[in-house]
Amino acid sequence: MNYVREILESYFVLCPRGFSPSTYRMYEVMALGRCPVVIADEWISPKINAKWENALVFIKEKQVADIDNILRSLGPQLALKKGAYAQAIWLEEMNEEVKYKRFMKDLIEIYHQGEYSKEQLFSYWRSRPFRKENKWLISQKIKNKIISK
């Protein structure tokens, strides 16, 4: 419960990238009505009807040293406003019940299009070409780091 209390006592909550450009912490923070601070250069928004700039603060990975100044300049009022919008997105578009209904609907739609079998989809999602297409390969991440400096 300390984790939840820490989030609820904060205006902004840091959500650094995980293995992928996104992180589960962002969704936890949204559900609790606080402003997520996404620290990821390659973050890709979920495909839902939301104005992400109204719900999140985005920090480039090379700006990590300036996070304190950036967040102080934004202030608590903006954090509360973004947190409320983030929670509204969560409740309307991403809560467990809605998320799984949308996920199943999307899978059924893909399946009925008849282009891919279930086995083909799973095989592709686990493949190197899929990781390359999404720029998740280690070599691509290193290259992006070098270019961004």
Image (tube, grey):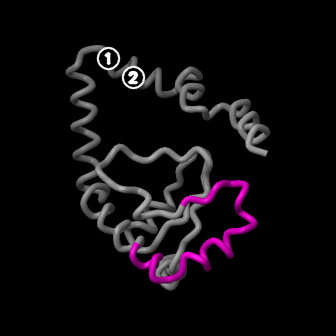
Near mark 1 (Cα within 10 A), the count class, few <14, some 14-19 or many ≥20, is few
The amino acid sitting under disc 2 is: Leu
Check if residue 18 falls in the magenta segment.
no
Residue at 50 percent across and 77 percent down: it is: 7
Q: Return the residue at label 2.
A: 121
Residue at 41 percent across and 66 percent down: it is: 30
Classify 105 as above or below 46. above
Direction from residue 63 to residue 122 in the image, left or right:
left
Foreground pick, 124 / 93 = 93
Classify 25 as above or below 9. above
Magenta stretch, main secondary structure, is: helix
Direction from residue 137 to residue 99 in the image, left or right:
left
Foreground pick, 78 / 121 = 78
Q: What element carries label 2?
A: helix
Q: Return the residue at label 1.
A: 117
Q: Is mark 1 on a helix, strand or loop?
A: loop
Foreground pick, 129 / 1 = 129
Check if residue 63 falls in the magenta segment.
yes
Kindly report the distance in space between the C-alpha atoms of the residues bearing marks 1 and 2: 6 Å
The amino acid sitting under disc 1 is: Ser
Residue at 71 percent across and 37 percent down: it is: 144
Pinpoint residue 148: horizontal percent, then vertical percent.
74, 43
Pinpoint residue 71: horizontal percent, then vertical percent.
60, 74
Near mark 2 (Cα within 10 A), the count class, few <14, some 14-19 or many ≥20, is some
Segment tinted magenta in the rendering: 58-81
Residue at 55 percent across and 26 percent down: it is: 133
Direction from residue 31 to residue 42 in the image, left or right:
right
Q: Quadrant of the C terminus?
A: top right
Q: Confirm or deny contact between disc 1 and disc 2 (CB under 8 A).
A: yes
Pinpoint residue 4: horizontal percent, then vertical percent.
48, 77
Q: Which mark is residue 97?
A: none
